[in-house]
């Protein structure tokens, strides 16, 4: 959710408890009065001489008393508070010497009873010394928010370290919203230590009051009946301060709280809202014309609902005027259409009305922009919400639509639901909170393709191209973001962003934007020039870093890994990034695959290369919006794995730079060539001429390549191709630069033996390849030597594979090959050797098939009838 949308939601009708009839400057003196403490208040004495606690002090202040009392009446309530705070140092002096009291003159009055300093037992009355001013509260023209409340600021005079600041006041409210009901949330834990705290609630016995603590272990209240009133009193002593922890979910409260409410259930809340959203029967021609226009475009109910949603999102600008009746009741849809602005309740009632006239079941629904996850644990209350959306039903499908979102283009079936987790639909028939499906993990897809062209040289200017594809909800949000900035401002922001990764970067062309609203995909294309990508240190070492910048925010270390509260995560997130580097020369690169799977996210990266191209692919998908405390240790470990896998760097010495073309490394080239020539000579002179006598077969034995013999036949055809591919991979190191760079891509322990072992493979590889080709020729010529040579060939391949895999597994290079994997494959190979050795030695078909000799050409004869009719077995 972007900041502007969040701001709009936070200022909705139910956030306000009333409003002034005009947003105007108000003299401070008209907003408050000095008076005596009301008679219904139970007074308490401050313990000025209490000794400081041994620990737990924070923010330079110690609250000696927080005494809050509420008297609930028939049409409102009186809220009394008495606080005393000892100032311990300069920080506490700055934080506590100004007091702010909120009041809304349209339905509240503020009475100040006590305002004083207590210094060394002497009371200094501040009622005439303090500077008292008032400013409009929560009025923000930039965010299109207008509220009629005021903040009365009490700036105390001559406050010193060691003083006790003491004040008490009462706010009396007449409930214009929902008279006859009372609900409120009280914080009972604080970031600063508290010596003594009391919460006293008086309410009519005729209106049973429920209460619920957010945490277990809180005190049981004292209960006392006074005629028609019941009194609940909660007491706490010696409360330690609870330090805040950042990055916690919005629905999680750091500090314990107490909910009180006389609503019986959520259905009573929903029913109380119905009169506010009921339309009268008068004509609304502009609304009817809009509905007719949507109907004239045809389409399915889903398509018409999307048109209505887009109209409310795009054509009705957001402005919240929470003044007078506008603070709690939506404006008439006809009025909203005429003035073309409204807040969340205005837009929701307008959208629901349009949908109903299109024949679609729709109703406004109350949600909370931050605390939706925790709503099922809250007591029923009309003040449990701060935003309004629409619940629309089409057939069996239910859609949750937000008229304050950026214009959405995806079809309703693919539309990301308004992400508030729980909602209360407005209507007398609505009896409970309804769960809103969470967006799918891949709901907000973003794909980034970055290409860095270094083919002119590591120290030469390079081009950098970036293509970003936004889909569905991501496309909707980026459209709104792009519309708020000019082309020049946007280009400057992007260049400054990349300059942190690639110093010396500048725009080569203006960024282009392609917007496909039909498929809800937006594509941006950026083009830059970088003066020099490689960095050079004092030792003449050139280093190039390929940045996986789209992944940074999901892998960087969190600020506080030792936590007692859940950690908030971005959700939904589905990001893919590909970084391609076009190099001036071949490079020794090991293909890799890294996966990190956590309950909160999935991460995967791959490194692939071909000749002079390196391709890095990254993928991150959020699976949850938070991490519970119990899962944090595992999450921190897995997040570090992601962080360690970020970016890719390669380097070389400037004096070891390879030429732009191909150059041969003498050692591997010579070894490969000598091995190939010697192997060819041995195959012709020795192996091909090996001519043992054929073994006699049973008269009834079948001959020819069939039955089980087909498997060795296919193997003899495949082996040369497989070996040729493996040798081709090794022959890359015939390039001088690749050969020189080999020790740099293995672990330190393998640097001494990496090149000698590679020479061994380059020597044995061509020999085994030539042998496999020779065996294939002998096999299909049915030479008598083929069975024995096939088994020898099989032993050579198994041994060669074992040595290569073992070397890779112990080289320190990331690979799927591990010692366990190598041993497993060796055992499989040995089993295959044993089975095929036995088959070649005992099979009658083998004996009857491999009968040809080098010196004796096969004779042509007509088989006897008995041989033709015989049924033999392998």
Image: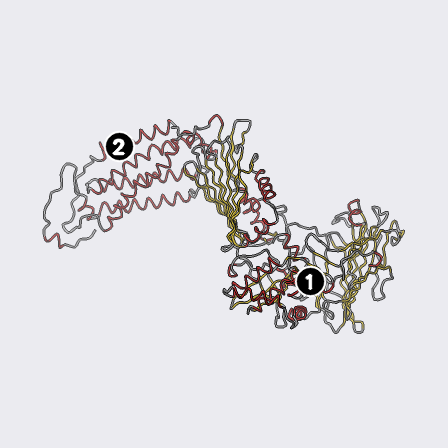
Left or right: where 24 falls relative to 469: right
Residue nearest the observer in this picture, 295 or 120: 295
Q: Is residue 156 visible?
A: yes
The label on residue 14 is 1
Q: Residue at x 74, y 69 (%)?
A: 179
List the single residue furthest toward the top: 655
Which quadrant is the N terminus positioned in?
Answer: bottom right
> Colour mode?
secondary structure
Residue nearest the observer in this picture, 303 or 75: 303
Left or right: where 489 falls relative to 616: right
Residue nearest the observer in this picture, 482 or 107: 482
Distance, label 2 to label 1, CA atoms, is 88 Å
Q: Residue 191: image x %, image y %?
A: 72, 52
Q: Residue 39: image x %, image y %?
A: 85, 66
User: Which element type, helix, strand or loop, lies under badge 2?
Assistant: helix
Up/down of 550 relative to 143, above or below:
above
User: Which element type, helix, strand or loop, lies under badge 1?
Assistant: helix
Query: Of callouts 2 and 1, which one flags the residue occurring earlier in the amino acid sequence?
Result: 1
| The image quarter in which residue 422 lies | bottom right
Q: Residue 387: image x %, image y %?
A: 65, 61
Q: Circle 2 is placed at which residue position?
A: 680
Left or right: where 794 falls relative to 441: left
Q: Is residue 641 visible?
A: no
Up/down of 535 relative to 165, above or below:
above
Residue nearest the observer in this picture, 252 or 652: 652
- Of circles 2 and 1, the one toward us is 1
Q: Residue 580: image x %, image y %?
A: 47, 40
Q: Residues within 10 Å of mark 2 (few under 14, many from 20)?
A: some
| The image quarter in which residue 806 lies | top left
Left or right: where 64 falls relative to 279: right
């Amino acid at each position: 959710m972007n900041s502007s949308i969040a701001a709009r939601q936070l200022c909705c009708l139910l956030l306000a408890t009333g409003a002034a009839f005009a947003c105007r400057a108000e003299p401070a003196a008209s907003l408050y009065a000095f008076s005596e403490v009301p008679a219904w208040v139970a007074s308490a004495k401050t313990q000025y001489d209490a000794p400081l606690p041994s620990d737990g002090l924070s923010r330079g202040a110690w609250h000696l008393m927080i005494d809050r009392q509420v008297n609930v009446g028939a049409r409102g309530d009186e809220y009394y508070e008495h606080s005393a705070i000892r100032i311990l140092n300069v920080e506490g002096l700055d934080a506590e010497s100004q007091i702010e009291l909120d009041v809304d003159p349209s339905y509240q009055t503020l009475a100040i009873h006590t305002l004083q300093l207590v210094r060394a037992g002497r009371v200094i009355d501040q009622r005439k010394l303090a500077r008292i001013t008032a400013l409009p509260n929560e009025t923000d023209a930039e965010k299109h928010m207008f509220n009629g409340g005021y903040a009365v600021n009490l700036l105390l005079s001559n406050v010193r370290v060691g003083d006790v600041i003491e004040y008490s006041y009462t706010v009396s409210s007449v409930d214009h919203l929902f008279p006859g009901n009372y609900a409120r949330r009280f914080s009972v834990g604080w970031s600063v230590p508290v010596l003594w705290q009391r919460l006293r609630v008086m309410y009519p016995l005729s209106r049973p009051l429920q209460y619920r603590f957010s945490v277990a272990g809180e005190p049981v209240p004292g209960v006392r009946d006074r005629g028609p009133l019941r009194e609940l009193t909660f007491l706490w002593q010696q409360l330690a301060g609870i330090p805040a922890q950042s990055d916690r979910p919005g629905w999680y409260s750091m500090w314990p709280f107490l909910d009180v409410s006389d609503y019986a259930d959520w259905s009573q809340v929903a029913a109380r809202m119905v009169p506010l959203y009921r339309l009268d029967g008068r004509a609304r021609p502009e609304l009817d014309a809009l509905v007719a226009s949507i109907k004239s475009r045809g389409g399915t109910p889903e398509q018409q609902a999307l048109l209505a949603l887009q109209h409310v999102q795009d054509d009705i600008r957001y402005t919240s005027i929470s003044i007078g009746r506008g603070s709690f009741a939506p404006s008439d849809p006809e009025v909203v259409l005429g003035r073309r602005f409204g807040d969340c309740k205005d837009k929701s009632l307008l959208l629901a009305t349009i949908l109903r006239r299109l024949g679609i079941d729709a109703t406004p629904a109350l949600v909370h922009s931050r605390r939706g996850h925790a709503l099922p644990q809250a007591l029923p209350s009309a003040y449990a919400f701060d935003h309004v959306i629409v619940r629309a039903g089409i057939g069996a499908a239910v859609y949750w639509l937000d008229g304050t979102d950026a214009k959405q283009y995806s079809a309703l079936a693919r539309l990301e639901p308004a992400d508030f987790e729980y909602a209360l639909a407005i209507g007398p028939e609505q009896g409970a909170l309804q769960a809103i499906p969470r967006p799918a993990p891949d709901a907000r897809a973003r794909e980034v393709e970055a290409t860095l062209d270094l083919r002119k040289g590591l120290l030469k200017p390079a081009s950098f191209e970036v293509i970003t594809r936004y889909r569905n909800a991501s496309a909707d949000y980026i459209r709104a973001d792009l519309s708020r900035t000019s082309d020049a401002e946007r280009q400057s922001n992007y260049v400054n962003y990349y300059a942190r990764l690639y110093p010396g970067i500048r725009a080569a062309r203006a960024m282009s934007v392609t917007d496909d609203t039909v498929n809800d995909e937006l594509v941006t294309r950026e083009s830059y020039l970088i003066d020099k990508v490689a960095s050079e240190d004092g030792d003449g070492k050139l280093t190039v870093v390929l940045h996986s910048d789209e992944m940074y925010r999901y892998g960087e270390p969190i600020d506080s890994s030792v936590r007692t509260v859940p950690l908030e995560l971005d959700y939904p997130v589905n990001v893919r990034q590909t970084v391609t580097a076009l190099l001036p020369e071949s490079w020794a690169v090991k293909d890799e695959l890294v996966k990190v799977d956590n309950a909160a996210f999935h991460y995967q990266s791959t490194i692939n290369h071909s000749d002079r191209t390196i391709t890095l692919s990254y993928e991150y998908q959020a699976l949850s919006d938070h991490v519970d405390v119990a899962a944090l240790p595992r999450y921190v470990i897995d997040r570090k794995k992601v962080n360690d896998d970020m970016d890719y760097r390669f380097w070389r010495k400037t004096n070891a730079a390879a030429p732009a073309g191909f150059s041969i490394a003498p050692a591997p080239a010579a070894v490969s060539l000598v091995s190939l020539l010697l192997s060819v000579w041995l195959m012709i002179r020795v192996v091909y001429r090996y001519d043992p006598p054929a073994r006699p077969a049973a008269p009834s034995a079948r001959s020819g390549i069939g039955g089980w013999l087909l498997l060795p036949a296919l193997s003899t055809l495949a082996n040369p191709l497989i070996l040729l591919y493996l040798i081709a991979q090794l022959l890359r190191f015939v390039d001088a630069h690749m050969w020189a760079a080999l020790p740099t891509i293995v672990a330190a322990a393998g640097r001494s033996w990496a090149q000698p072992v590679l020479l061994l493979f380059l020597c044995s590889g061509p020999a085994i390849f030539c042998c496999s080709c020779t065996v294939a020729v002998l096999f299909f010529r049915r030479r008598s030597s083929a069975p024995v040579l096939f088994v020898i060939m099989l032993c050579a391949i198994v041994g060669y594979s074992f040595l290569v895999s073992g070397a890779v597994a112990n080289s320190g290079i990331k690979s799927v090959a591990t010692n366990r994997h190598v041993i497993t494959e060796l055992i499989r190979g040995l089993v295959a050797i044993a089975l095929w050795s036995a088959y070649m030695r005992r099979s009658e078909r083998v004996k009857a098939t491999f009968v040809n000799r080098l010196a004796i050409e096969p004779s042509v004869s007509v088989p006897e009838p008995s041989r033709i009719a015989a049924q033999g077995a392998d």
